[in-house]
Image (cartoon, rainbow, N blue to C red):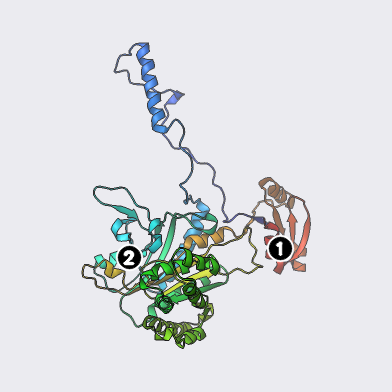
Amino acid sequence: MLRLGPLAAAGRLLPAGPRFGPPRPSGGRVSLSRSRPPGPVGDRGLLARQVRAAAGSAGGGRSPALKTPKGTRDHPPAHVALRDRLLAAVVTCFKRHGAAAIDTPVLELRETLMGKYGEDTKLIYELQDQGGELLALRYDLTVPFARYLAMNKITNMKRYHVAKVYRRDNPATTRGRYREFYQCDFDIAGQFDPMIPDAECLKIVHEILSDLQLGDFIIKVNDRRILNGVFAVCGIPESKFITMCSTVDKLDKIPWEEVRSEMVGEKGLSPEAADHIGEYVQLHGGLDLIEQLLQDPKLSQNKLAKEGLGDMKLLFEYLTLFGITGKISFDLSLARGLDYYTGVIFEAVLLQTENDHVEEPVSVGSVAGGGRYDGLVGMFDPKGRKVPCVGVSIGIERIFSILEQRVKAEMLYKKDPKLLKQLQYCEDTGIPLAAIIGEQELTDGVVKLRDVATREEVDIPREKLVDEIRRRLEP
């Protein structure tokens, strides 16, 4: 019999182990040193009051709150096992593409991180002065990698890095957004033929999402040079390009009308300029769209846009050779709000159909993202020497949140597997559904699905079982 329940990850609670703490003397009594003669009773009472007062001031007069900080969480053994399997699948792909692992400190100098993340700079965790150094917790793994390359004078490297990063964001745990979370990064640094490393990064995203079997997905691609060209032909001053990218980047979360309102009301654009931008950033397609924009009378006259469109066309030619263009969309709304991107940018999102029922609506946003950042290493090099780089980050926590909301199914193994005992176990532990497969069900090609609470049973064709379980477990 299958054990079915609405929880996320399979796993069993471990029996309570021994409690560890300060040793307790036998007999339950504590021996006190008698090296000092006992004072008067009044002194002992005063001392007791002083001890109690000190304890109250140190602990606030109450026990500390037993909770994790906002935007963080503990991971029980079952979660850790699932996460380890996910990380192993991702790392296997990285190694297959020839990457070597590095590690960097979780702390960076504050000046290393500031000015690299646009409007998201406010999300960096800054620490108090520590011995004359102003420090911060790393926001991502890309900027520390660029610092590592510049510091060690490395000009050619293919690396991966799996580690925790920290963001003072508003957490949304149901969507896999935390303040402490893992990133899994793959980056290629060095001079290579145009678009070959970029195409390899997209191939890696395609391989990982396909291997994990999370469902249908699409990888959006764009180029910062194309976006900057769009802003230029729409009359936007160059000083506003980066802030415009941050605004356009919100199109995957809010409708165009709200983005337009922000452009006009907060960023000071004229309604005509905002409408002109909207004509471009709502376009998406493939090679046909690239060819169309190459013939655009305004964009074709802009040097940056023309370069970006030429590289995008070359990128799609490589992706066609890889056989993955069916999952790639050239999307002009993709902006990636970080300051350090200079060329191709991309983001992978999961697609859900109306029939893709889960216990709760799953909206986890993007599950991978990255792009080209050719100028970042030069920001750290004393002589400003640039090292071209492109990379991708897999959002392992967001993928984990999806798997958490999958239906849990488990066999109940018994030495004496009598059906009534197993059904009684379901009632005792609150399992809502039981799937029963006997000889007759095997012959008929069905599964008997029992509602544990009402004891109602119905035969379900095997190919419809998953949909029926999801329908019944909907909130």
Q: On screen, 5 above or below 216?
A: above
**Residue 323 appears in view:** yes
Q: Quadrant of residue 198?
A: bottom left
Secondary element type, mark 1 = helix
Q: Quadrant of residue 386?
A: bottom left
Numbered circle sitting on residue 228: none
Q: On screen, 459 above or below 227?
A: above
Q: On screen, 343 above or below 173?
A: below
- Residue placed most toward the observer, 242 or 262: 262
Tell me the distance, in whole angstroms, between the alpha carbons under discs 2 and 1. 48 Å
- Residue placed most toward the observer, 83 or 426: 83
Secondary element type, mark 2 = helix
Image quarter of the C terminus? bottom right
The residue under the point 44% across, 30% down is: 61
Q: Which residue is mark 1?
A: 468
Point out residue 251 in the picture as x, y percentages from the top left corner: 51, 68
- Residue placed most toward the observer, 350 or 38: 350
The residue under the point 28% across, 52% down is: 134
Q: Which residue is mark 2?
A: 145
The residue under the point 72% across, 61% down is: 437
Q: Residues within 10 Å of mark 1 (few under 14, many from 20)?
A: some
